[in-house]
Image: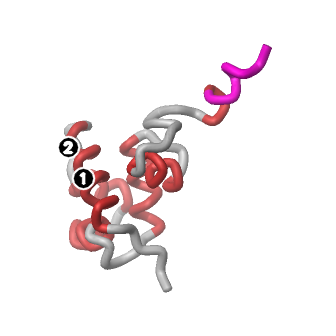
Amino acid sequence: MANLIFRRTGYWIQHQLKLSALGQKEVAGEANVSLSMVTHFLGGRKDSERVRTALCKVLGYESFGAVIAASRGHVPQKGARHEQVHSEFQP
């Protein structure tokens, strides 16, 4: 079975796009897929690696796992890099 996202995660992603003054159309263009595909992905009805990659790029996340974690309130938040998280613990 495909790795479909939960509908509430799709709502959170849509909200983040809106806060960034972006829309599904920009994600579709970046992913080179139809607007319908992005809509179905965010609604939890279809899965697409292209859409996952495009969302990471336009929202500024390194991986889709980071997007999911942020949608659940976990850190690191948007824009945080793996190296930055570990550098604060180094002497």
| Above or below, comparing residue 85 to residue 19 in the picture | above
Residue 91 location, x and y as percent? 79, 13
Label pair 2/1, CB-CB below 8 angstroms: yes
Which residue shows up at 39% across the image and 62% down it? 51
Name the residue rendered at 63%, 29% in the picture. Answer: 85
Q: How are the colours assigned in the image? A: secondary structure
Left or right? Give the position of 43 relative to 75.
Answer: left
Q: Which residue: 23% across, 56% down?
A: 24
Please name the residue that numbered disc 2 is placed on.
18
Give me the disc on residue 14: 1
The one nearer the camera, 61 or 5, is 5
Q: Residue furthest top?
A: 91
**In terms of image quadrants, where is residue 21?**
top left
Circle 1 SS class: helix
What is the tally of numbered marks visible in this picture?
2
Q: Position of residue 62 (x, y in %)?
A: 54, 44
Q: Is residue 54 above or below residue 21?
A: below
- Residue at coordinates 48% horizontally, 74% vertically from top-left? 3
Q: CA distance from mark 2 to mark 1?
A: 6 Å
Residue 48, position as x, y percentages in the image: 42, 71
Quadrant position of residue 36: bottom left
Q: Horizontal placement of 21 versus 45: left or right? A: left
The residue at the far right in this view is 91
Q: Secondary structure at mark 2?
A: helix
Please give the range of residues in magenta.
Answer: 85-91
Q: Is residue 32 above or below residue 21?
A: below
Q: Residues within 10 Å of mark 2 (few under 14, many from 20)?
A: few
Where's residue 86, x and y in %?
69, 28
Could you tell me the amino acid type at mark 2? Answer: Lys
